[in-house]
Image: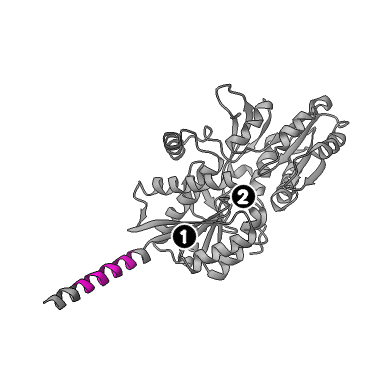
Amino acid sequence: MRTIHIFKGIISSLTAALLATAAQADDLKIALIYGKTGPLEAYAKQTEAGLRLGFEYATKGTNMIDGRKIVIITKDDQGKPDLSKAALSEAYQDDGADIAIGTTSSAAALADLPVAEENKKILIVEPAVADQITGEKWNRYIFRTGRNSSQDAISNAVAIGKPGVTVATLAQDYAFGRDGVAAFKEALAKTGATLGAEEYVPTSTTDFTAVGQRLFDALKDKPGKKIIWVIWAGAGDPLTKLQDMDPKRYGIELSTGGNILPALAAYKRLPGMEGATYYYYDIPKNPVNDWLVAEHQKRFNAPPDFFTAGGFSAAMAVVTAVTKAKSTDSEKLIAAMEGMEFDTPKGKMIFRKEDHQALQSMYHFRVKVDPNLAWAVNEPVREIKIDEMAIPIRNKR
């Protein structure tokens, strides 16, 4: 009898193990590749917080799609292309990820693109912005919920460009900065404004004295309104450094796009400055953003930030796509996602069929100072809608 009981016990254990393995195999595995440590750490942490909140909202708190439990597998690439490529390969091949999301750095994201193609798996790029990601380096397994450099640049050109305005640009000397300025120049020309100068500096730059003076010299004798437009990611704070050099003595104004709330603290020194932003928590008015703002405030005692909205949007895209495709098969997902509309904290986004870039609104803002806030308010001037921005299709499809 004892032998029979032992045998039954073994069978029960094996059955439980098999059931557990089957349940795990049926999990919906989402890999998040991000620069959790490194220069873009703040962006990465916001992306993760937004992703988790987005899945919660989109699944009405169940964190399940069609009976499959959503499991998020996180991998820190430190913002390094080689580590990112290895992390994504591991996620697809060893962890069995159905879909991957990432990464934070544009250089790392570019390294990831061929990995998705080699594994024939979907990669939703969030929040890296270089145009090449959905441009010349793109492949059909790549979708992007994050805005691209052209969307950033064109919206800023629309916000500040007009006849009689001369603009000079300052950017970081890598894909993010150069792609951004290229798109900005193209869009600026259509507004009637004039480009006065371009300057590119290393991402590690902290002393902007020499480049600032070159920009001042390029603009100071120009007639009409003169603006230095800055496109920057990470540390360095060029806006504050340029402001310290007193551009107003030459009649020069500063402009830039939106940023995370800690960076907006520096904008308090620039009341009235205008630009265009991807997201500011108090601008979009829709039920998704209302929920995000309320829940984030409740849980973190702070409003959601720039990249929180991005992570949330990526989660909404995944849930919409898997529900529509009724599968995580890559071919079925591609068919479902091309042209797909989905809700986000910014309102509707649309994955453009030609390059899988998410078309989305941007926001023309003016800096307002509220003494009760540590950051500058991005006061809305107007929503720049999808049809106002002719975002170029740059891939070779």
Q: Residue at x 78, y 46 (%)?
A: 201
Q: Does the stretch in magenta take in 185?
A: no
Q: Nearer the viewer, residue 232 or 224?
A: 232
Residue receiving disc 2: 38
Contact between labelled residues 2 and 1, with CB atoms less than 8 Å apart: no
* Image quadrant where residue 86 sits: bottom right
To which residue does mark 1 refer? 336
What span is colored magenta in the figure? 9-23
* Disc 2, SS: loop
Q: Is residue 277 left or right of residue 96?
A: right
Inspect the image, locate mark 1, and give the three-letter code of the amino acid beneath it: Ala
Q: Amino acid at mark 2?
A: Gly
Task: Please check the rendered image and state whether residue 15 is part of the magenta-colored stretch, yes or no.
Answer: yes
Question: Can you say whether 342 is above or below 133 in the image?
Answer: above
> Gap between marks 1 and 2, in whole Å?
35 Å
Magenta segment, prevailing SS (helix, strand or loop):
helix
Secondary structure beneath label 1: helix
